Image (tube, grey):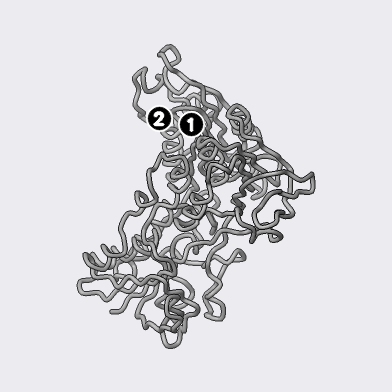
Amino acid sequence: MKYVIIGGDAAGMTAAMEIYRNVPGAEITSVERGFIYSYGQCGLPYVVDGRISSTKRLIARDVATFRDKYGIDALVGHEVERIDVEKQCVIGTDLASGEQFEIPYDKLLIATGADPVMSVKKGADLAGVHMVKTIPMLEDLLADLTPDIKHATIIGGGYIGLEMAETLQASGKKVRLIQRSGYVAKFLDKELAQHVHEEAKKQGVEVLLNTSVEAFEGKVRVERVVTKEGTFDTDLVIVATGIQPNTQFLKDTGIVLAKNGAVIVNRHLETSIENIYAAGDCAMHFNIVKDRLDYVPLGTTANKHGRVAGLNMSGKFASFRGIVGTSIMKFFDLSVASTGINEDTAKQLGFEYEAFKYSARHIAGYYPGAQRMFIKIVVRKRDQQLLGAQIIGPAGVDKRIDVFATALYNKMTLPDLLDLDLAYAPPFNGVWDPLQQVARINGRL
């Protein structure tokens, strides 16, 4: 049995290892257009200020390990350009030699991830304009962060934009963040995002809202950012305005794609073409809360996708039950977390809902070091079934968002939270956890 995997990162190589474990003697070939396998993209921002000492620390398994220890033919610098579904082979170019290659498969996994979007076209080729998605991209940025660079401008206020704002500021640069809409961290509702704005101001990060970037200007190197609201001087730019699934090479294969280009898969990660699977950031995900396919590209989901795809390709029977859309990020002294849907999304989807806001200490209020967290919970109106939560604070956020995500996954109601047997001691919690405090005040069944 010949297995071919396109993409050498989280989803692809998780699947490869499942095949390796479950199919003795399997012939596995992985095809990667880059030169680095299995690394933690989410750790990239933290190399900037030295919290992570080197990009090498982010690599879980290198190419040699896959080749020598596991017998996987791990190709690098090989870009797949099309798939012949009739002949069952992948076709592309060896970027080093320029020669075309053709690799046959019995089962194929598409795990090509997503590429960052360069949302500003004019001046994007100037030196000093960067995106941060891969280790080579980050190393280009690091080489550019010389002592002469005093000021950096970040375009986009999502996860990467905010994390880069923190680490650049921590490394001694002045930072301006430009956001096209009225608030940053769009996975939050506006009133929760205000806490992020306040933290940015406290830390000296300039935030420009409702500002659209039109161009970058400079002779050889970027010197100015041009917006509809004015022109701003800068020494360096990072564009972090989103990603798009890397699926352009699937044109004319008959593989069904969503409007955003992501591959539509079933619960077993199978595509619309027999013997072809897809996983990770190039594929759609079933959202349990929305009860429909969704696109939430996160490393956790990519690894789970890869596991399920690898098991099914190995002849096992495994289903991907879905996501609830849980995420968390650090922004200076704040932890910012979300799971499920926020109020804005509930409105857009036509849910009849209620939303509750609450503020509580993360541990017993009388215990030294108790700090305030801010919580917003969205529930379905008719039966109080949980739909989503947003939590922000300097401590205790990760514990609560994971509890709530577990409750979401199991379709619990707001009053059900009262029955959870959660750990209590004054240094760790109040006798009623903050989530349970929301339920006590608002739950009514």
Q: Which residue is mark 2?
A: 419
**Does residue 66 appear in the picture of this structure?**
yes
Snapshot quadrant of residue 315: bottom left
For this orientation, the residue located farthest to the right is 229
Give left or right: position of 107 versus 49.
Answer: left
Disc 1 to disc 2: CB gap under 8 Å: yes
The label number, if any, that marks residue 415 in the structure image: 1
Task: Give the camera-side residue of 112 and 262.
Answer: 112
Task: Give the camera-side residue of 199 and 284.
Answer: 199
Estimate the x, y position of residue 441 in percent, counting from the top left: 54, 23
Q: Helix or strand or loop: what does disc 2 sit on?
A: helix
Task: Give the camera-side residue of 14 and 445.
Answer: 14
Give left or right: position of 57 versus 180.
Answer: left
Task: Give the camera-side residue of 241 and 245.
Answer: 241
Q: Amino acid type of disc 1?
A: Pro
Q: Helix or strand or loop: what does disc 1 sit on?
A: helix
Q: Amino acid type of disc 2?
A: Asp
Vertical position of residue 8 compared to residue 339: above or below: below
Callout 2: few (<14), some (14-19), or many (20+) C-alpha neighbours within 10 Å? few
Q: For the point 60% across and 40% down, which residue is it?
A: 150
Q: For the point 35% across and 29% down, which residue is it?
A: 421
* Cα distance between the residues tagged 1 and 2: 8 Å
Estimate the x, y position of residue 2 in percent, counting from the top left: 31, 79
Estimate the x, y position of residue 331 in percent, counting from the top left: 52, 35
Vertical position of residue 66 compared to residue 49: above or below: below
Snapshot quadrant of residue 274: bottom left
